[in-house]
Image (cartoon, rainbow, N blue to C red):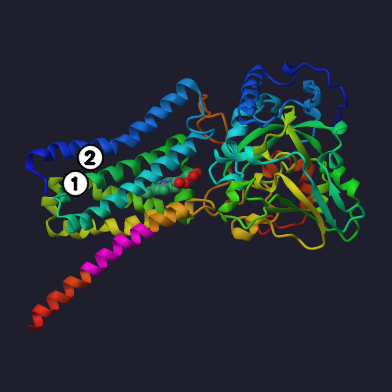
Amino acid sequence: MLAKKYRPWLRLLIHIICVAPALWISYQIWLWLNFETHVLTANPIEHITDFTGKWTVRFLLITLSVTPLVKLTKWRLLVYRRLLGLYAFLYGLMHFLNYMVLDYFFDWELIIEDVLERKAITFGMLALVGLLILAATSFKFAVKKLGKKWQKLHRLIYPLTIFAVTHNYMMVKADVLIPTIHAIILAMLLSYRLYMYVQINKNSNKIRIA
Amino acid sequence: MLIKIKNSWDLKESDVTSEANFLSRRKFIQAAGIMGAGTAASIMVPSMTNAQIASKPGSNKYDGRDLADQQTSLDDIMSYNNFYEFGVDKGDPMAKAHTLITDPWSVTVEGHCENPGEYSVEDLVDHNALEERIYRMRCVEAWSMVIPWVGVSLSQVINKLKPTAKAKYIYFETLVDKKQMPGQVNRVIRWPYREGLRMDEAMNPLAIMAVGLYGRKLTKQNGAPLRMVVPWKYGFKGIKSIVKISFVEKQPVSSWMRLQSEEYGFYANVNPRVSHPRWSQSKERRIGEFTGIGGLSRQKTLMFNGYGEQVAHLYDGMNLRRNF
Ligand code: HEM
């Protein structure tokens, strides 16, 4: 249980943790541009793509972990789920902007070809569009406006995370260890939902029978 | 036209490369000292005049600039490598390759040839015939470098070994030794790393056996003591730290073909029109050139990496889309 007076501090702490990777990579970029060292490897743009991509997946998985964690610990963390999801979107956006601006420099012909013709990138784009929809409807106004539909819409998080991890798996060249770990964590998080869903249905059936 | 420069070993080091490269080389010497790699300068290649460089095979101008002016810095060449024997990260080879013992080194030659046996590097590569070749290197991952290799034509090596008429392909293997190559604990690839060429490809004067770069012995992360360089093909064809050469009748299965045959073919010729399933091959990022004006965008990849004049005839009548 968390006393109410600590909540703003917890919120601040979460913000700090979530912003830290972005600050870190910004600092590294600054080092690279000013001192021309090898902090970002010989191919900084690829490094930034990998870095932001990884953090997007991590934030998605962390977001999906909130509900099971709340059930397990009874901590009141549910209010932070939306925040974590928004950060996942922000990192995904950085990942895409890095690709669009630094990597391909608005080469729309190539970008469109990538998104339409290469399945791995298609999955990434689907995940990002999904995140964009969720981010755009995550504010109080949208929650009110959408009412019951809001919850249904926000179940998009499940398929889009599957797309994201699929994209991750397909984009690495040979060493699939990390995307495999991501996939296992995702499978566990989804199994938990399935288990809960089956349980609830069973119970409600029982009630109906009784 | 091939130009061979013989035995003028008395040139100053600073003549060989531009000052920036010279500086980064000094850093390299320091690094080598720290790593205990002991790669002191034992090979020196004379510098060449621009006229000579321009007439070297495949060094046609690119972006209106001479290749010699585009050389990738030694720092980048040494710190950004795909050499999974030392780990899958590009920085792993630099960090871990010091465990490789390159001296003594022995290469087993077998198969359809008149002179099979065990060879030292010096037996295979005549150090009096060393040349500098400045080549573009195009990685299948859509980045590229310009590297001043030191070596001899692969054909020279092959002529020594005297393949018989039965030899249709040449096949190579990299060392397998988990102690020396810690990345081999991870079986991302079924070791040893394998590569091969059709005999006529191997005999093309552009294909070289390299023993050095930037006028010095090869660094371990770049494939010491002996590696292949086939500049019209994707970089992974350039097998490193070679311990076996075999002359065979059937087309060998290379490591990347075996891993993902729908993504990596036997020929692996640089071809901007045949994209990789996950990215386009039509453009490439030249390592070290991101920050300049216009450097943000990628540059166009050339058919056969720009070496079509020298090698396109090898593939006359072949469907290069199918034989990728
Ligand atoms: C929100 C959804 C997305 C997530 C979670 C995501 C995540 C990732 C991850 C984890 C990687 C692998 C990094 C590594 O090698 O370790 C990656 C690579 C990559 N992603 Fe995404 N991505 C997303 C969307 C996109 C989109 C929309 C594009 C482009 C249209 C894109 C383009 C790329 C590219 C080009 C790479 C390969 C980088 C390289 O050269 O190694 N991604 N992504």
Q: Amino acid at mark 2?
A: Ile
Q: Are marks 2 and 1 in contact (CB under 8 Å)?
A: yes
Relative to B265, say whether A49 is above or below: above
Number of dots carrying numbers? 2
- Residue to which mark 1 is pinned: A80
Q: Residue B314 at what x, y percent from top left?
A: 79, 50
Q: Quadrant of residue A3?
A: top left
Q: Amino acid at mark 1?
A: Tyr
Measure the C-alpha gap from mark 2 to mark 1: 8 Å
Q: Residue A98 at what x, y percent from top left?
A: 42, 37
Residue A14: give its label: 2
Give the structural element (helix, strand or loop) at label 1: helix
Q: Chain of mark 2?
A: A
Give the structural element (helix, strand or loop) at label 2: helix
Residue B100: give its label: none
For the residue pair A52 and A154, the one nearer the viewer reads as A52
Answer whether residue A116 is visible to the viewer in this image.
no
Instruction: Tell me the magenta residue range.
Output: A184-196
Q: Is residue B150 magenta?
A: no
Q: Residue B78 at what x, y percent from top left?
A: 62, 33
